[in-house]
Image: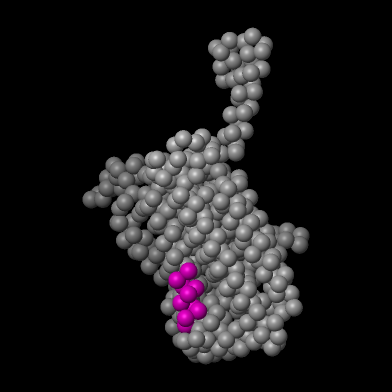
């Protein structure tokens, strides 16, 4: 026995007790998340129509079927991964779907379609990305893809403006937010570039007056990428995403260089950028005014915030009950203010459960970053976790009037296909990093991937053919090279 593995079996047949426990725990938690969603769905129908929905059995079967399919794929291709990430995302997704159903049946039908596609893209990402090093090797491709996606809404005839923000793209019948996918592409680029240059950046060999700074040729590409993202987001009036990209960059620089000075510099830059935005953009001044005192314009800009606060107050500790509140009083409750709807009908206890779910996801992501010994994986896990945590903080903080409200979705909960698809891609990448860390720690065999087995089979086949033709090993090596 060694590290829980049975040594008298071939590598591909070994079973790790640690991995098995994680997968069994994951399956149990997934079933629990599915049942909680089903019960919430039934209670919402009872509270609204005083009857159990006739399709509840079909709903539960489809719901559990999708979740179990996602679990089976994780069990097959990422069996060493953390066992809490998928169940927590499933719980948030399920509660969000119930609230969307409660608010608008038509949107619930669309969200169901997006949910099916999200599970599919989650499975596809896990099957396609079997080694995280494949992502690091394509860092410049991800940079170009991220830049393209950020600029796409600015293209005349393609980009669309909604609620003052030009963040949508319409191509025929398809509408989506490319920025949701750009954040993942740029997180991969930042992680790969900083992993490759972290020591050179941390060296600080460039002296400017009394300061020692990193050499410009090492730090310039990542600063250009970050500055480009923030400037484009400001130009599109997507302040929430601008704050998200800014925080992502600062956190990854801090983790890569292990220099807390970047946090201090980031705070100063953020303060300056916030003051500049408030001084020069009227829509920013409006949002700050509505944040400070929404009652100055109770029927205009402050209406959403006031109605959300009243809804949270009506919910109290235990909530009004599913189907018994008035979440529709808040405009766009299915998007920016879905947390207020949850707080009204689930109460403080339910809202706290949602917050704790995000805290647990962030904890699992940071634990994954700590467990891996590869710099790229550590930075990637940190970046992806930062995206989820900061995004949740921005929107929940805006609803609770902790910070000014910005147009950004609540991960896995808010209505929207772009957000749901991108968050499931992010989840799949986190699971892949977690599985890679477990294999590096020897918790289960680091078996070849399907792609590596295919390449090995093709190589062995070519060798056999070369031997039949009477070629020497030297001739074959020269032909392959």
Q: Quick one: 80 or 85, which is closer to the camera?
A: 80
Query: Residue shown at 34%/42% (left/top)?
Result: 199
Query: Residue shown at 66%/61% (left/top)?
Result: 65
Residue span colored magenta: 348-357
Residue 285, can we see it? no
Query: Residue shown at 66%/55% (left/top)?
Result: 120
Quadrant position of residue 154:
bottom right
Name the spot of residue 211 as percent of width and height, x first. 26, 50
Q: In this rendering, would 376 be left or right of 74?
A: left
Q: Classify 142 as above or below 41.
A: above
Q: In this rendering, would 169 be left or right of 195?
A: right
Q: Classify 321 as above or below 253.
A: below
Query: Residue shown at 64%/56% (left/top)?
Result: 69
Name the spot of residue 183 as percent of width and height, x first. 53, 56
Residue 89 magenta: no
Q: Quick one: 274 or 465, which is closer to the camera?
A: 465
Name the spot of residue 328 as percent of width and height, x first. 63, 84
Per the picture, the main secondary structure of the magenta-coloured stretch is: helix
């Amino acid at each position: 026995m060694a590290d829980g593995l049975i040594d008298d079996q071939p590598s591909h047949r070994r079973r790790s007790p640690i991995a098995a426990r994680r997968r069994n725990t994951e399956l149990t938690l997934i079933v629990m998340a599915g049942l909680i969603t089903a019960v919430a769905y039934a209670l919402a129908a009872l509270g609204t129509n005083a009857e159990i929905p006739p399709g509840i059995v079909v709903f539960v079967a489809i719901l559990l079927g999708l979740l179990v399919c996602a679990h089976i794929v994780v069990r097959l291709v990422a069996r060493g991964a953390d066992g809490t990430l998928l169940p927590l995302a499933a719980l948030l997704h399920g509660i969000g779907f119930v609230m969307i159903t409660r608010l608008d049946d038509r949107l619930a039908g669309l969200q169901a379609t997006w949910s099916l596609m999200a599970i599919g893209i989650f499975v596809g990402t896990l099957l396609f990305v079997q080694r995280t090093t494949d992502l690091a090797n394509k860092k410049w491709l991800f940079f170009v893809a991220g830049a393209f996606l950020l600029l796409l809404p600015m293209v005349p005839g393609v980009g669309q403006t909604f609620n003052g923000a030009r963040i949508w793209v319409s191509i025929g019948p398809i509408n989506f937010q490319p920025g949701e996918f750009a954040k993942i592409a740029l997180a991969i680029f930042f992680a790969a570039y900083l992993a490759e240059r972290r020591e050179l950046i941390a060296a600080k060999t460039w002296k400017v007056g009394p300061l020692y700074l990193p050499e410009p040729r090492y730090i310039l590409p990542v600063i250009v990428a970050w500055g480009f993202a923030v400037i484009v987001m400001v130009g599109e009036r997507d302040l929430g995403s601008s704050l998200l990209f800014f925080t992502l960059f600062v956190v990854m620089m801090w983790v890569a260089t292990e220099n807390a000075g970047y946090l201090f510099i980031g705070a100063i830059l953020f303060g300056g950028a916030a003051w500049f935005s408030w001084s020069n953009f009227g829509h920013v001044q409006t949002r700050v005014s509505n944040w400070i005192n929404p009652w100055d314009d109770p029927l205009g800009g402050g209406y959403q915030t006031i109605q959300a606060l009243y809804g949270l107050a009506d919910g109290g500790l235990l909530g009004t009950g599913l189907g018994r509140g008035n979440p529709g009083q808040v405009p766009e409750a299915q998007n920016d203010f879905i947390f207020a709807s949850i707080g009204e009908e689930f109460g403080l206890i339910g809202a706290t459960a949602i917050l704790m779910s995000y805290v647990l996801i962030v904890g699992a992501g940071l634990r994954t970053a700590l467990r891996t010994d590869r710099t790229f994986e550590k930075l990637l896990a940190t970046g992806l976790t930062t995206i989820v945590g900061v995004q949740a903080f921005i929107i929940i903080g805006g609803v609770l009037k902790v910070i000014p409200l910005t147009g950004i979705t609540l991960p896995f909960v808010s209505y929207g296909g772009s957000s749901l698809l991108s968050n499931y891609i992010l989840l799949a990448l986190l699971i892949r990093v977690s599985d890679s860390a477990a294999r590096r720690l020897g918790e289960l065999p680091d078996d070849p991937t399907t792609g590596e087995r295919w390449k090995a089979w093709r190589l062995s086949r070519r060798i056999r053919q070369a031997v039949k033709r009477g070629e020497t090993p030297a001739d074959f090596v020269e032909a392959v090279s």
